[in-house]
Amino acid sequence: MKLAGKRSVWLEYLVIFLGTGLMATAIKACFDACGLVTGGFSGAAILVKEWTRGIVENGVPLWLTNLSLNIPLFILATKLKGFSFVKKALVGDMTLTMWLAVLPEWKLSDDLLLSSVYGGIILGVGIGLVFLGGGTTGGTDMLAAIIQKYMRHYTIAQIMQFIDGSIVLVGMYVFGIRKGLYAIIAVYLVTKVSDGLIEGLKFSKAVHIITDKPEAIARMIIHDLDRGVTGISAKGMYSGQEKLMLYCVVGKKELVQLKEKIDEIDPKAFVIVGDAREVHGEGFIERSEKHTKIT
């Protein structure tokens, strides 16, 4: 995603705004409504709400707990790591808190499986959008980064897994093992969907082509697909023949067309296709000298 200049800064804000809206929808309509604790500060907020039902009518609101947990965390993180470390999360956390405050109380479904599946998908899409917009929402990832400063023999990921796992286990104790198991399904889907959204938008295909007609195939790639292609000197170790192996990167939608045209030119061509997880350059993710992000 090319995000540069004034217009792109506002685009990033919009993406974060929409992403946190989806996150809040999943938290309120799926997880809180059904007692599914999926970790993070949102999971902790659901637990606090349940624990305080006898003290406060309907329990302490999710937005208030989320804000209360993040404020001291932001202050501590600013003192330890500087404001540049926390400002990425500030926009995301404020908009998530706002959404949690304004969205009405409602339940997507009484079915725990549907709530865990659709909640996981919606939350995963929301998190993916926030990350694509250059933001985060603070929470346990920031807490883990602070803890890791004093426990350097553990990685941030390991600390996050411990914190989130502990919250999920407490959720099992409070709401029951059955709901806890459904919450684990949601956690898995959140990870898969958010990773898929972030990486899927940048995925391309790296193609190696071994052929007796490299010039013809190279011309086809350049003129028909409007893609670049590189010739690499190679040697067949069985035949001992010197050959020119072609290497190019294409989008996923272009791959089918590429393979069909290669078959037309040289049905005996040997084609190897692999994933290129991220490609920077003309025609893919383009760089900008003035790349502005919400940081």
Image (cartoon, rainbow, N blue to C red):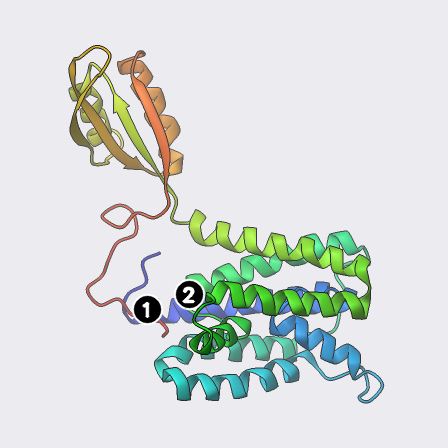
Residue 291 higher or lower than 221, as above or below: below
Which of discs 1 and 2 lies nearer the camera? The answer is: 2
Q: Residue at x 74, y 73 (%)?
A: 105
Which quadrant: the N terminus? bottom left
Q: Residue at x 47, y 74 (%)?
A: 151
First along the sequence among labels 1 and 2: 1
Residue 202 versus residue 173: which sits nearer the camera? Answer: 173
Q: The residue tagged with tag 2: helix, strand or loop? A: loop
Q: Residue furthest front?
A: 153
Residue 117 higher or lower than 27, as above or below: above
Q: Is residue 177 left or right of residue 44?
A: right
Q: The residue tagged with tag 1: helix, strand or loop? A: helix
Instruction: Examine the image and state in which quarter residue 212 appears.
Output: top left
Q: Residue at x 53, y 68 (%)?
A: 159
Residue count near mark 2 (Cα–Cα under 10 Å), binned few <14, some 14–19, many ≥20: many
Q: Is residue 110 left or right of residue 104?
A: right
User: Cβ–Cβ below 8 Å for labels 1 and 2?
Assistant: no
Q: Is residue 164 left or right of residue 284?
A: right
Query: Which residue in the protein does label 2 denote?
Result: 133
Query: Which residue in the protein does label 1 denote?
Result: 7
Tell me the CA gap for discs 1 and 2.
13 Å
Q: Residue at x 39, y 27 (%)?
A: 256
Disc 2 residue type (three-letter): Gly
The location of residue 49, given as percent across then percent down, is 75, 79
The location of residue 264, given as percent across then percent down, is 31, 14
The location of residue 95, given as percent across then percent down, is 53, 77
Q: Which circle marks residue 61 in the picture?
A: none
Disc 1 residue type (three-letter): Arg
Residue count near mark 1 (Cα–Cα under 10 Å), binned few <14, some 14–19, many ≥20: few
The location of residue 169, given as percent across then percent down, is 71, 66
Which quadrant: the C terminus? bottom left
Tally the marks: 2
